[in-house]
Image: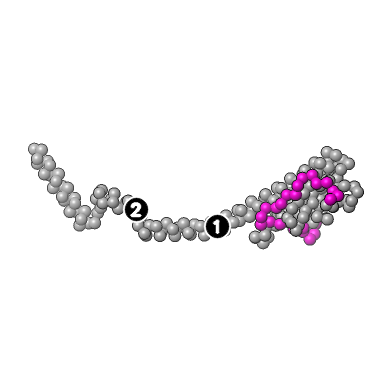
Amino acid sequence: MGRQTHRACQAVWAADRERDRVTGAVGARDLRRASSGFSMLEVVVVLTVVGILTVAVAPSLSRFVDNTRLRSGTEVVRNQLMVAKMRAVANPDVHCGVHFDTTAGTSLVFHDSSSGSLNRYVAGEDRVYSPAKTLPDGTRFSVPGTGGITNLAVVFRGDGSAKFGGAIEIVSNRYTGRKRRIVVNAVVGNVKVVIP
């Protein structure tokens, strides 16, 4: 009985092999050999898909980096303005401000001395509270034509108000029209960030 079962199994296996040969089906042994690498067509398809995705994502990644730089520069300037206001309020006899160097792209917090020109920064005469901070790459300062700050500085008084209010913009060098505006209300000294 055992021999007959074995012969029957061999006959079934032989029929399976013949059917696979005729239909082009792949056996388990052939499948292992076929899956041991990638065909050239598979590599080309994958590289094409990766290339298409890269082309599609690159512009949005560039905009993301640009927005991050604008936000970062805006936060630095906003924080400097708040420090200047807090220093002025802490000592009402001292006027404290932030000077913007539009050429170098830097800003610094200073003590507006009474001996020099009030409401502007005079190098060598006014005391600097913190070293100049530089805007991130790809950004620059811009003073709006109307409503801009005066003398490239915002100076706060002891009551928290600003001598002159106005706006300063941080502008993207890469994308036209991308900017953030920081507005200082002269009456109460509020500092507000606006995305025009």
Which of 100/129 is in front?
129
Task: Locate the N terminus by quadrant.
Answer: top left
On the image, the x and y values in percent for residue 43 come to 39, 57
**Residue at horizontal 15 percent and vertical 47 percent from the top:** 12
Q: Nearer the viewer, mark 1 or mark 2?
A: 2
* Residue with the most extreme front position: 124
Which of 72/148 is in front?
72
First in sequence, mark 1 or 2: give its number. Answer: 2
In 3D space, how far apart are the residues under numbered discs 1 and 2 (Cα atoms)? 31 Å
List the residue tagged with mark 2.
37
**Residue at horizontal 73 percent and vertical 49 percent from the top:** 133
Category of crowding for the residue at label 1, using alpha-carbon neighbours closer than 10 angstroms: few (below 14), some (14–19), many (at least 20) = few
On the image, the x and y values in percent for residue 65 come to 61, 53
On the image, the x and y values in percent for residue 104 come to 74, 56
Q: Is residue 40 above or below residue 16?
A: below
Amino acid tagged 1: Ala
Q: Is residue 154 left or right of residue 39?
A: right
List the residue tagged with mark 1.
58
Residue 162: in sight, yes or no? Answer: no
Task: Locate the C terminus by quadrant.
Answer: bottom right
Q: Determine the main secondary structure of the stretch shown in magenta.
A: loop
Magenta region, residue range:
124-147
Amino acid tagged 2: Gly
Q: Which element carries disc 2, helix, strand or loop?
A: loop
